[in-house]
Amino acid sequence: ANARILDQVRRLEEENQRLRREVGRKEEALGVLRISELRFRQECANLKSYAIDMARGMTSMEVQLYDVDDAIADETERLTLAYLPVIRELQEELNQVKEQLAEERRNNGKARR
């Protein structure tokens, strides 16, 4: 009976050691997973920060583009106003030349008759 009890105690001690080794391996694996999780969380935080910085940069570029668009519109308006008198003068000259040409055609038509 004692031998059987000793055998059961020995098997229980062996099982206990095996379970302790298994718990140790699982704790190691959990430690590795925790480290991986921390790295993953850090990468996520870095990506979020990068995305925020990129969005800020894009917003800044959009503002700059609007500034450029405004500057182009202002310059276009300024040039239009500056050249408007010149354009009107050229249009008047063109109209005068067209009238002279029409008059000459009418005169030439009368002379041929």
Image (tube, grey):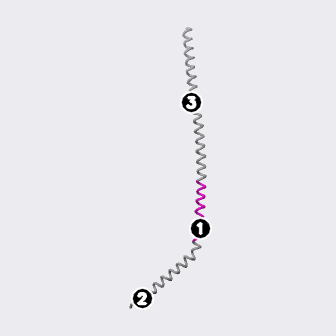
State which tag comes first along the sequence, 2 or 1: 1
Q: Quadrant of residue 77?
A: bottom right
User: Residue 22: image x %, image y %?
Assistant: 55, 24
Q: Are marks 2 and 1 in contact (CB under 8 Å)?
A: no
Please give the residue where the numbered disc 2 appears in the rendered image.
108
**Quadrant housing the N terminus:** top right
Question: What main secondary structure does the magenta stretch of the protein show?
Answer: helix
Residue located 52% across and 81% down the image = 93
Residue 35 shown in magenta: no
Q: Is residue 84 above or below residue 68?
A: below
Range shown magenta? 58-79
Residue located 48% across and 85% down the image = 100
Q: Is residue 49 above or below residue 38?
A: below
**Quadrant housing the C terminus:** bottom left
Tell me the CA gap for discs 3 and 1: 68 Å
State which tag comes first along the sequence, 2 or 3: 3
Q: Is residue 111 left or right of residue 74?
A: left
Residue located 58% across and 57% down the image = 62
Q: Quadrant of residue 64?
A: bottom right
Residue 75, disc? 1
Q: Amino acid at mark 3?
A: Ala
User: Residue 59: image x %, image y %?
Assistant: 60, 54
Residue 29, disc? 3
Give the foreground label among 2 and 3. 2
State which tag comes first along the sequence, 3 or 1: 3
Q: Is residue 62 above or below residue 95?
A: above
